[in-house]
Amino acid sequence: MASPKNDKSTRTTGRPTLNEVARRAGVSPITASRALRGVSTVAEELAERVRQAASELGYVANPAARALASAQSHAVAVLVPSLSNQLFVDTLEAIHSVLRPQGLEVLIGNFHYSRDEEENLIRNYLAYQPRGLLLTGFERTESARRMVEASGIPCVYMMDLDHGAGLHCVGFSQLSAGAAAAEHLLSRGRHRLAYVGAQLDQRTLLRGEGFRRALQKAGCYDPALELLTPRPSSVGLGGEMFSQLLASHPQVDGIFFGNDDLAQGALLEAMRRGVKIPEQVAVLGFNDLPSSEFMVPRLSSIRTPREAIGRRAAEQLLALINGKPVGEPVLDLGFELKVRESS
């Protein structure tokens, strides 16, 4: 008895295959694969036929098998420290808008500001042989650094800048942003200035360092007016730290908060206590979250280019993946001081 024909288009599991989708749509398997990955070069009429065929068959792609077959996946791993912070949500949306039309899937990893968690995520994602990596900042374990370097996978760093490491990065100077905050409050005639920071990731500490240097230059730095905590940044914590600062240093006349949610909490607590903002205390936030301009009073803040960072970092990574030159490996997108009623 003749053995059955070896047809690679079928699986013993009975699940529909890409070849079956392609046959039903009347296209090649390569075109079907590109259409399902959203590659923009596939004509919309063909793409719609493929999507319809996949829907009728109940086809679900197997990215692991695809990666094994090609020794390369169609995914980009993006690691951020938080998904509850609007800063990173905006950045991720921009990254997705650039990579998805190119047929690349975005794998999002949240490491909760933990270096060990980030190391584990990097190890797990590298096992899937992603096309590229988008990492937040430069602070990570030595083991994680070695893994990224040894992988040979294109990598772009977001939010921070490093002009001397030979890396590709897109962001702005945290030190300069902190200095700009101090200079603004000083220009308002305030001289008892405090810095309030939470979470204490490297970017928060760098903003504080920039603030400190500017105050030292102006001759009005007081180390007692730095209030820092490793606790997660939040509106509630901002109100708590505002109260703590005024209780211990009632002479404070200006405060720079390392995140807008902290500053928003301070404004709410000031309203409860009858503290006049900015007459008694000028308040300045950081990141300029969407709700800040609707606070009472409207919150002054340093606006960061979070959407632009995500978009330009993704574009830079695409160039690296495709072997194209990158015009500016270190791309400084700057920041903007938004002066409103609170300062």
Image (cartoon, helix red, strand yellow):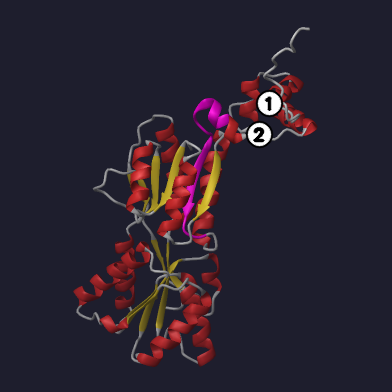
User: In what quadrant of the picture does the N terminus appear?
Assistant: top right
Left-right relation of 56 to 291: right
For this rendering, which residue is in front, 43 or 78? 78
The percent coordinates of residue 195 (x first, y second) are: 35, 76
Q: Residue at x 43, y 30 (%)?
A: 322
Q: Nearer the viewer, residue 270 or 18?
A: 18
What is the quadrant of residue 104 in the picture? top right
In reply to whether residue 319 is colored magenta, the answer given is: no
Position above or below: 274 against 144: below
The span shown in magenta is 66-82
Badge 1 marks a residue whose secondary structure is helix
Q: How far across and down, in percent of the image, does residue 128 sit? A: 51, 38
Query: Count of labels shown?
Result: 2
The CA distance from mark 2 to mark 1 is 8 Å
Residue 67 forms part of the magenta stretch = yes
**Amino acid type assigned to the residue bearing label 2 in the image:** Ala
- Which residue is label 2 attached to? 61
**241 to 12, vertically: above or below:** below
Q: Earlier in the sequence, mark 2 or mark 1?
A: 1
Q: Residue furthest top?
A: 1
In the image, which disc is placed on residue 18?
1
| Relative image position of residue 98 (x, y in whole percent) | 52, 41
Crowding at mark 1 (Cα within 10 Å: few <14, some 14-19, many 20+): many
- State if disc 1 and disc 2 touch (CB < 8 Å): yes
